[in-house]
Amino acid sequence: MNITLIIVIFTAIISIYALQKEEIMDKLIFSPTAISQQNQWYRFVSSGFIHADLGHLFFNMYSFYSFGAYVEEEFDTLFGPSIGKILYIVLYITAIIISSIPSFIKNKDNYYYRSLGASGAVSAIVFAFIMVSPTSKMGLMFIPIGIPSYIFGLLFLVVSSILDKRGGGNINHSAHIFGAIYGALFITTLGTLLGHINIFYLFISQIAGY
């Protein structure tokens, strides 16, 4: 059983349990005021393991597993099985935190703001995949038409930025954006420093040769 599947199972268990227990949901959800005024810093992480409903849970975990299994193998190749798995877990957990920081800064005095879900971490994993495999075909769920992943990633960032500026809705687009950027930077930086492979150069080379 790989790390990706373990995270999926753990997240599913916590999410489903929290959906049945409102007090647990309230305790784990991302609340900037609870963090800033009550020092409940654990919410930066706990909020990434709960979801609004089963559809939200399924979409995030389906997306995560689809790309995570491949990225996990790439980490094993780049850094060795032991260190690779540790760094893979570090990427996932820290992506939950990093992707929530902009929302925290913007809403630290907003008692009505709440956020939850693994979207920031999933975005980080997807963009780590894009950096190592930029010409692989990607598409929306259940739509078989695919485009090169680097184009998909660019469109994703543009659309997310537009929707984030527009505001409204219940989707934390800034978490998608910052999670995506963080994931790309994480694998590029550590791949170069620890794996001694210039990920960015390989990224450009694959696109140029496509």
Image: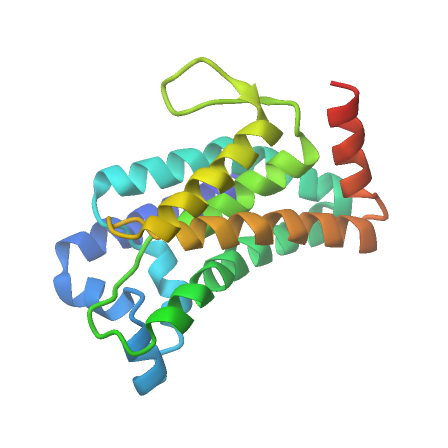
Nearer-the-camera pick, 35 or 209: 209
What residue appears at the point 21 percent right and 54 percent down from the top-left corner?
Answer: 17
Q: Relative to 61, does residue 120 appear above or below in the rendering? A: below
Q: How many marks?
A: 0
Would residue 197 appear left or right of 46 to someone viewing this image?
right
What residue appears at the point 34 percent right and 76 percent down from the top-left corner?
Answer: 108
Would residue 25 appear left or right of 193 to someone viewing this image?
left
Quarter occupied by residue 132? top right
What colouring style does the render use?
rainbow
Classify the position of the C terminus by image quarter: top right
What residue appears at the point 24 percent right and 70 percent down from the top-left corner?
Answer: 27
Q: From the top left corner, tell me how far across and down residue 69 is, in percent.
A: 55, 35
Q: From the top left corner, tell me how far across and down residue 10 is, in percent.
A: 37, 50
Q: Does any portion of residue 181 appear in the rendered image?
A: yes
Would residue 26 appear left or right of 61 to someone viewing this image?
left
Q: From the top left corner, tell me how far across and down residue 171 is, in percent.
A: 30, 48
Q: Does any portion of residue 64 appear in the rendered image?
A: no
What residue appears at the point 21 percent right and 57 percent down from the top-left corner?
Answer: 18
Residue at the right extreme?
196
Q: Relative to 209, does residue 61 appear above or below in the rendering? A: below
Quarter occupied by residue 54? top left
Q: From the top left corner, tell me how far across and down residue 41 is, in percent.
A: 40, 77
Residue at the top extreme?
144
Nearer-the-camera pick, 13 or 118: 118
